[in-house]
Amino acid sequence: MSTWTYAASALFIVVLFAYAIFFSKTYIEQKKISTWDARSAALSAIPGQKAAENTITTYQKKLADYKTLSANHTISSHVFSFIEERTLPNVWFSSFSMAESIQELVVAGEAQDMTTLSKQTKLFEQSTQYIKTMSVLNADVGTDGKVKFTINLTLDPAIFNYGSVPLPPKASSQNPL
């Protein structure tokens, strides 16, 4: 009987020791958590901190939404590829307004000078495969010498096909005329 008593006593001591270890670990971790909670509360009390956190959260949501949209977007219009290939290096487009139902594209942008704008319009005029008509709606020379313009392009409906539409060769950036 004494062997069983010693074994039971040893088991009781081991269980008691394990309980003491787990209790002390839990106490230490709860202290760390309360310290971090106090630090977090102190940081959130900084003026503007909550607004900055909300702004960051908003941007994170927008980025996640954009990532979802861009991951699911597999087809792009040939119009953008066509315009990209036909744009001279010193021309920047800032606005695109496309109406597929009437095959019209209005682009607004800025050119380095009037000569560059003339070359750009000439490139568009030469692209008769996809551009039916073209007109410069507006062209203003700014004080810095740059030309702000708006061009209206009437496009051939074939450019809106999402299948494989062969685009004409790229424009030469050195001498497009």
Image (spheres, rainbow, N blue to C red):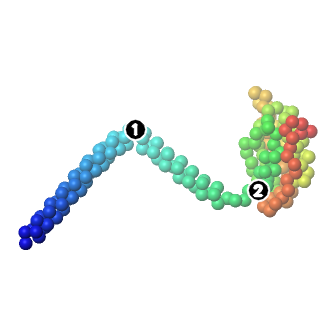
- The residue depicted at 78 percent of the width and 58 percent of the height is 100
**In the image, is 12 to the left or to the right of 143?**
left
Nearest the camera: 44 or 164? 164
* Residue 142 in which image quadrant: top right
Q: Which residue is mark 1?
A: 47
For mark 2, give the secondary structure: loop
- The residue depicted at 40 percent of the width and 38 percent of the height is 47
In the picture, the quarter occupied by the C terminus is top right
Q: Which residue is mark 2?
A: 77
Q: Position of residue 115 (x, y in %)?
A: 86, 33
The kind of residue on which mark 2 rests is Ser
Q: Position of residue 32 (x, y in %)?
A: 29, 47
> Which of the two discs, 1 and 2, sits closer to the camera?
2
- Give above or below for 6 relative to 35: below
Nearest the camera: 27 or 118? 27
- Give above or below for 86 relative to 174: below
